[in-house]
Image: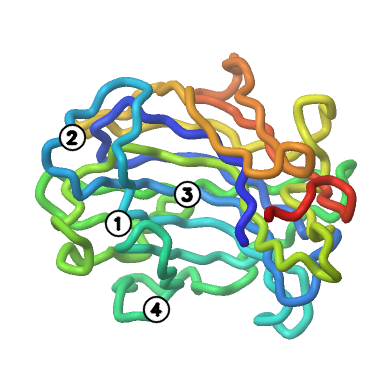
Amino acid sequence: MREFAVAIAANGPYRGAYVLLPVWKAARVHGSEFTATFLIVGGTVDTGFLPTPGQLPPDVTNQIGVGFFANPSLNGGDNNPRLNVFYTPDGGKSQCYNLQCGGFIQTNKDIALGASIVNGASDVNDHVPYVLVSIAKDAAGPWHVLVNDTDLGYYPRPIFPWLFPEAVANVVGGAVLNTWPGGKHTDTVMGNGRRPPGDDRTAVVKGYIAINAAGAQVVDQLTLGVHTAPSCYDFTVLDYSEDMPGITVAFGGSGGPDCSPRPA
């Protein structure tokens, strides 16, 4: 199962979002699991849904994401955070990464998908590098994915139900694939392994900015969230920073065998 600690903005409709993602080299990733930090934009196939501030539709069927994943079982045993783009046309039942499934059309190969494009910080005392990621579209076009302002490519409109003309949710934070090794909760870390709100040295995503329906960049509110195992991994929306436009979100945690009982 996937564990999430994410903050959600639902004040659309949106034409995308920007955020600065921290690049941490995971201290611990168990077995065939992964840990990830990402930005996701999501849309509904309910054509009767009218976006209302702070409310999500019954479904968020269409989703596009970009972020950094550490998955040793796929990467020769290393915990390096690797750039991935991904999408789901069915609310997460299927996940298609990078160039799989005939989804993403890569138009610029200056930045390699699935690669460690920057050395991640390994210790909370290290200087952590940040990478600017965004997912955006113009009024009539498809959704594009950008990394450090480089447009990597786009998702063709026909791969999504109802063509995904706008987003109703922007999501920032992290996830861990929890396989319940030995019948206990995984000890795979999220972020840098520190958990908010009690720890002030947690990983943070910085400068979340939304793109509104008119295509303008706006400071948005992250008023919703999901933390599936808050005793293991959590998030906290922080105050505005005078030296950083947008919103900052602390997230993460260390996991561990005693942090959460297994669902029945």
In primary-sequence order, the first of circles 2 and 3 is: 2
Q: Residue at x 74, y 58 (%)?
A: 120
Between residue 112 and residue 71, name the one nearer to us.
Answer: 71
Nearer the observer: mark 1 or 4; the answer is: 4
SS for dot 3: strand
Q: Which residue is mark 2?
A: 49
The amino acid pointed to by label 2 is: Phe
In the image: residue 189, left or right of residue 164? right
The amino acid pointed to by label 3 is: Val
Q: Which residue is mark 4?
A: 99
Q: Dot 4 surroundings within 10 Å: few (below 14), some, or many (20 or more)?
A: some
Contact check, label 1 and label 2, Cβ < 8 Å: no
Identify the disc placed on residue 133. 3
- Residue 225, placed above or below residue 243: below
Q: Dot 1 surroundings within 10 Å: few (below 14), some, or many (20 or more)?
A: many
Rounded to the nearest angstrom, the CA distance separating label 3 from label 4 is 18 Å
In primary-sequence order, the first of circles 1 and 2 is: 2
SS for dot 4: loop
